[in-house]
């Protein structure tokens, strides 16, 4: 028998403090999210994604900061052209970041300059892949546009409306940073080995690909379409929960209150001229889902998370659902790279312990 190991163990590391950060603060009980002390609602109303990236990387609040999208190095474009058209956009983005790392060979520790360069490159790469898979040529970045408007421009070949750029900017702001979530923790683990910022972001994209983390908004759209009409909502939700289906856009490891990012995005979605026609249905489904989840799980408050209202905002600006996870990854570049910088500045290799539950010592038969 293995010796008894009574050290505390928390499955999924829930509640375990695994580091220190000055980047963001979450109070899951009341639904509060601060980036470097600023409430998320104020940042959405009074900031831009470009300004928020600088705030995260440097700690300075400069509302006039600009981060235009960057051109794609030739070798990366060759890699993107070689991908099959049916490749998942998350895989294409991860491949592009990997190739970017091979071309630029970033040094360690990560710096704000590297964070700017990588965060400005990735939207160009995703937009290029989105066009190549439709048989269209990529569009060169417009240096006059901020990052989010520049992404939409490279995607569609025309400058976005002010309203679309502003709505997607709000989405990027709420997606920018969220403390020690799975992908950010992955980025920190990789940075802590003294690997470069591109490796950290590649790993983070891999971690974000799973539906329990970043893959939910496209599934939100599918679920809403399955529901079909407000009259069917109650029956559909009850049946889904009885079958063990997770309702996409609900529940969170940290939030027990309504996710403040969902609240901010609901406002944006409702104010959009181009909102999808199923937004009203989504609101009806949300009401039913919150009621049924509270009934089924009185022990654990399961509320709306950011992904639920990300879906109508992303659709409203014209993105197709299979681009949603990769678009979330673009927004989270700010947080991943800010955490890489923070980790590198005060580094210690991250190497937790594990409880052994396998065979005790045994021997190969003689
Ligand atoms: N629908 C139905 N039941 C749920 C949901 C849900 N969305 N979320 C949790 N539950 C249930 C679980 O099945 C579990 O029940 P059980 O004990 O009977 O098995 C119980 O509630 C407790 O679950 P948690 O421990 O709170 O779940 P956990 O913290 O492990 O997971 C997670 C959080 C992954 C977000 C989960 O709520 C989920 O799968 N949600 C749906 C997917 C989703 O919306 N993902 C996006 C998250 S936000 C983001 O990453 C940016």
Image (cartoon, grey):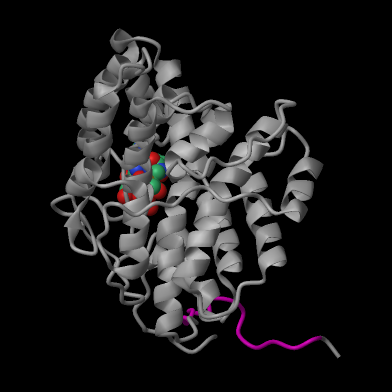
Q: Nearer the viewer, residue 45 or 353?
A: 45
Q: Specify the quarter for ligand 1.
A: top left
Residue 119: where, in percent of width, then height? 50, 55
Q: Residue lying furthest right in this view?
A: 366
Residue 86: where, in percent of width, then height? 72, 33
Residue 314: where, in percent of width, then height? 42, 30
Q: Residue lying furthest front in this view?
A: 144
Q: Which residues are magenta?
A: 352-364
Q: Residue at x 18, y 63 (%)?
A: 37
In this picture, is 174 found above or below 109?
A: above
Residue 105: where, in percent of width, then height? 67, 71
Q: Main secondary structure of the magenta part?
A: loop
- Name the image quarter holding the N terminus: bottom right
- Name the image quarter holding the C terminus: bottom right
> Is residue 318 in view?
yes
Magenta stretch containing residue 353, yes or no? Answer: yes
Q: Residue at x 20, y 29 (%)?
A: 291
In this picture, is 202 found above or below 4?
A: above
Magenta stretch containing residue 227, yes or no? Answer: no
Where, by quadrant of the figure, is residue 292 drawn?
A: top left
- In the shown orientation, is residue 131 left or right of residue 338? right
Q: Residue at x 40, y 11 (%)?
A: 228
- In the shown orientation, is residue 260 left or right of residue 344? left
> Is residue 177 in view?
no
In this picture, is 183 found above or below 143?
A: below
């Amino acid at each position: 028998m293995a010796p008894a190991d009574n050290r505390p163990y928390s499955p999924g590391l829930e509640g375990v403090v695994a580091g220190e950060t000055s980047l963001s603060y979450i109070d899951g009980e009341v639904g509060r999210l601060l980036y470097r002390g600023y409430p998320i609602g104020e940042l959405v109303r009074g900031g831009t994604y470009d300004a928020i990236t600088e705030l995260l990387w440097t700690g300075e609040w400069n509302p006039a900061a600009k981060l235009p999208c960057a051109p794609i190095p030739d070798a990366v474009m060759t890699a993107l052209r070689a991908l099959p058209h049916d490749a998942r956009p998350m895989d294409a983005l991860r491949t592009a970041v990997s190739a970017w790392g091979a071309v630029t060979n970033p040094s360690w520790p990560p710096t704000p300059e590297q964070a700017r360069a990588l965060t400005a490159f990735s939207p160009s790469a995703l937009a290029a892949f989105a066009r190549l898979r439709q048989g269209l040529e990529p569009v060169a970045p417009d240096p006059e546009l901020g990052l989010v408007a520049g992404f939409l421009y490279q995607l569609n070949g025309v400058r976005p409306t002010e309203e679309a750029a502003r709505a997607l900017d709000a989405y990027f702001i709420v997606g920018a940073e969220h403390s020690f979530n799975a992908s950010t923790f992955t980025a920190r683990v990789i940075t802590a080995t003294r690997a470069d910022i591109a490796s950290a972001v590649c790993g983070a994209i891999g971690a974000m690909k799973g539906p329990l983390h970043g893959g939910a908004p496209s599934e939100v759209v599918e679920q809403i379409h399955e529901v079909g009409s407000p009259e069917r909502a109650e029956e559909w939700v009850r049946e889904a929960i009885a079958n063990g289906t997770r309702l996409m856009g609900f529940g969170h490891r940290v939030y027990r209150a309504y996710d403040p990012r969902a609240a901010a995005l609901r406002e944006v979605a409702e104010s959009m001229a181009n909102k999808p026609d199923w937004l009203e249905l989504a609101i009806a489904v949300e009401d039913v889902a919150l009621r049924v989840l509270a009934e089924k799980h009185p022990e654990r408050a399961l509320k709306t998370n950011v992904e639920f209202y990300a879906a109508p905002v992303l659709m409203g600006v014209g993105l197709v659902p299979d681009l949603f996870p990769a678009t979330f990854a673009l927004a989270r570049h700010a947080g991943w790279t800010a955490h890489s910088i923070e980790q590198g500045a005060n580094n210690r290799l991250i190497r937790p312990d594990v409880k052994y539950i396998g065979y005790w010592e045994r021997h190969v038969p003689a």
